[in-house]
Image (cartoon, coloured by chain):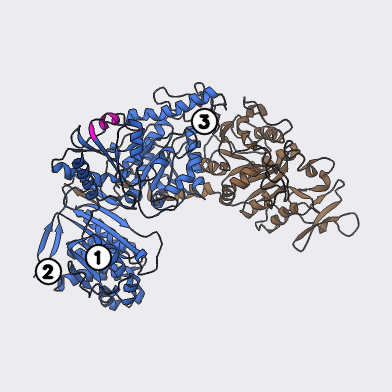
Chain colours: A blue, B brown
Amino acid sequence: MSKPVESLKEATIRFAGDSGDGMQLVGGEMANTSALIGNDIGVLPDFPAEIRAPAGTLPGVSGYQLHISSFDIHTPGEKYDALVAMNPAALKTNLENLKPNGILIINVGGFKDRNLKLAHYDSNPLEDGSLDKYQLFAVDMNTLTHKALEELGLSAKIVDRCKNFFALGMVFWLYNRTMDHALSLLKSKFSKKPELAEANSRALKAGSVYCEATEQFATSYEVKPAKLPRGKYRNISGNTATALGLIAASQKSGLPLFLGSYPITPASDILHELSKYKHYGVRTFQAEDEIAAICSVIGAAYSGSLAVTSTSGPGLALKGEALGLAISVELPLVVCNVQRAGPSTGMPTKTEQADLMQALYGRNGEAPLPVVAASKPADCFETAYEACRIAIKHMTPVLFLSDGYLANGAEPWPIPKAEDLPEIPVNFAKDPESFEPFLRDEDTLARPWAIPGTPGLEHRIGGIEKEAVTGNVSYDPRNHEYMTRMRAEKIEKIANDIPPTEIEGKKTGDLLLVGWGSTYGAIKTAVEHKQKEGKPVSRIHIIHLNPLPKDLGEILKSFKHVLIPEINAGQLVNVIRAKYMVPAIGFNKVQGLPFFSSEIEQKIDEILESK
Amino acid sequence: MNAETKAISPNGPTELKLTKKDFESDQEVRWCPGCGDYAILAQTQRTLPDLNIPKEKYVFVSGIGCSSRFPYYMDTYGFHTIHGRAPAIATGIKITNPDLSVWVITGDGDALSIGGNHFIHLLRRNVDINVILFNNRIYGLTKGQYSPTSEFGKVTKSTPFGSVDHPFNPVSVALGASATFVARTTDRDPAHLQKIIKRASAHKGTALIEVLQNCNIFNDGTWFKYTDKNSKAENVVYLEHGKPLVFGAEQDKGIRLNGFRPEAVSLTNGKYSEKDLLVHDEKDTDATYAFILSHMMDNPNLPIPVGVFRAIDKVCYEDAMAQQIEASKEKFGKPDLQALLEAGDTWDVE
């Protein structure tokens, strides 16, 4: 008497509850389980900056959105097929994006008068008919969880906390997910508190059994595995991918990895992740502040490590002066900036790509440095690796840009073969005969990396202008201009290594979309849709933001219109306009949220129709 | 540890046969004629050969200020960095390359104002770095503003009506930050300066040397009471481990404790003898005694202590870090990049 199963190509699900309800945990587990059975996934964790806003209030709502699919997807979805709302505040803040006739699972136990009032409801939406256009499943998870855990004799407080797993059990049943992974997760997560593992496991199973047993749910759904390219996969978040990319670069260059960092949202996970890998020779240093963090990294780079610092926008602002020093002394290091909404403290848990100008120009004097930006959570691996490669080859600090959306977002990652990763050669200066601190390599213009401890290479460097070749202090006006131009030219030469830009679509046409960073998925989805409709739209994505690819100018000039969507008020668009003199059009969203591909599609239509 | 590294032997034979000349760079020294910096540079260059450390192992890191030009004049590795940040940069150097002998050169403004944060955290962590703090109680490089060690009421370009800042006492600040080695010396006492540099180098952990140094342009004579041969003996008490605190031209005065307060007493009027005096104990792990000494500088009726205030053993940051790395390698085995990439839950797509 099992219930019918309907097959779906994709589904978007949102878990929403109080920030203490464990929505990130169960949402993440739904994502992991889906990835493990072979779905493509895209996720958007969306949580408040406060550790715990007052329970039941609108600012206290924590959400986790995931998009599971049987084909290759690029975004965490837009409108939800299913919404789990643990309390009225979660319902109020999320209902807007639930599809008409979408599945709405509500924890009735959370809909007490007090919570309704905190969410500013005048009447109970469960009773006033306002939810009629959805498939409403009102379930008292509080009571059902209590009943399921009765025999365990745990405190009411502990039992209350298990209701998130009851909700997950329901969603598992609804989308025909196996519980195996979640059960083993609970076992390892609570290995020291087996009673909690047992309690949550029971709640999980109870949620699933409840759906199977009751009359409420007539149908469940399945989303078949996606046809992804062959290979071994794991689910990975942007920050983890960044950390792994750095370790890989360390292993492939033979340089010990040093991370000097100061905790800041949403970059801290890079520090957390790298702290685990001491057996890979990784040294992590939690500095007293952002300035000390980058300065320790400059010291580590000077003495021959692969030196990295991780931060977010406000931290990058503090690092500016030291970054100038690293540019002046021409040492290789990587700064990972996980952007968030600004200015100032801004919205620490919300995403933005508004640090591009800071990355390109946020220093005193003429201080160019290479900037690369990751496009997807998994791509953080390659892009971090590329940042290390550039730093070492060209003897320069490199800025790696990620953002909150990539950092916390996750997707299936085809695990690369370590042996296929490109080697990163390192040449430390050794020979006192030929050594001059600022004698440049003919091809790259990089200066030699001469680390303390090398006999015969004793020399002095510093932030004061240096005489070409000898590195001695120099105030000679012509030398300063020469050195300024050399430093800039050195960065420009990096463009020689940048592969030709891939154009998705025709090489000429009416409209070219140019993206960078985390807008990748939304732009790609929008352009693919429009191309299917036969519209003359093409797309490129820029990883190297400084120097820009050599072929970029040519490409831009091959299209009638250029559209640049950005999660900022218009930054790359200004760079492109200034450098290539093309009338590129900006399309900007500054809400702390990623683009929906539908927003971009609409903009594409608008441009194509009006011109 | 590099096998070639020779043990530091402060008073032993100098097997490496280095001389002062080996530590003089080809750069012209540019400090104002008469500056106290010259003496500190000369005594450092004179002392390093005795430490028997290969030349290429030395790194001198400085911030900004007159004193911070110092690395340019040393024929070692040198890094002239940015305002106040030398301790952080030196930390990165030392913990990634513990084999190096790392020295921070800084001034009262650089270390205690703009770099105050890094200074206290370096001392707290006890990274094995030697800090020479040139204290002339003035901003020299920016031409004469008061510094964090300037006296209350100090009239300068930026305080025409007198400074209303209370000064820092570098030794007290260092002790407050749990420094394991703290010493004070002066630019006009070459032998003592050399001795203290050797002691600092031999210390495992952060070693702070405060050098009372003269700026003859903007703050001439600020320490002369303690450095001039006519007044020094009456105003300075030399600290020597295990010896009573005796001072005076005739060694006729001493320091005793009255409760927690130090007081200067005469040894000639029959009331007190040497056995009533404080006996210097640089090894006291409780910082209270060292604090009492450090605050003698704030009392105009007392001589100021010069010498090693404190020298205690405590694990160094870089050693603790290296131990964790070794323990981790033992526990988890050799690095395997492929295994790391494939860690966690994986699945195969056929």
Residue tagged 2: A218
Q: Nearer the viewer, mark 1 or mark 3?
A: 1
- Residue A56 placement (x, y as % from top left): 35, 70
Q: Which chain's residue wears label 3? A: A
Magenta span covers which residues? A547-560
For mark 2, does the 10 Å Cα neighbourhood hold few (<14), some (14 to 19), or many (20 or more) residues?
few
For mark 3, does the 10 Å Cα neighbourhood hold few (<14), some (14 to 19), or many (20 or more) residues?
some
- Residue A366 placement (x, y as % from top left): 47, 32
- What amino acid is found at the position of numbered circle 2 in the picture? Ala
Q: Which mark is residue A454?
A: 3
Q: Which chain's residue wears label 1? A: A
Cβ–Cβ below 8 Å for labels 1 and 3? no
- The image quarter containing residue B88 is top right
Helix, strand or loop at disc 3? loop
Q: Which of B214/A381 is in front?
A: B214
Q: Is residue A522 visible?
A: yes
Q: Earlier in the sequence, mark 2 or mark 1?
A: 1
- In the rendered image, residue A283 lying in the magenta stretch gets the answer no
Q: Residue at x 26, y 37 (%)?
A: A562
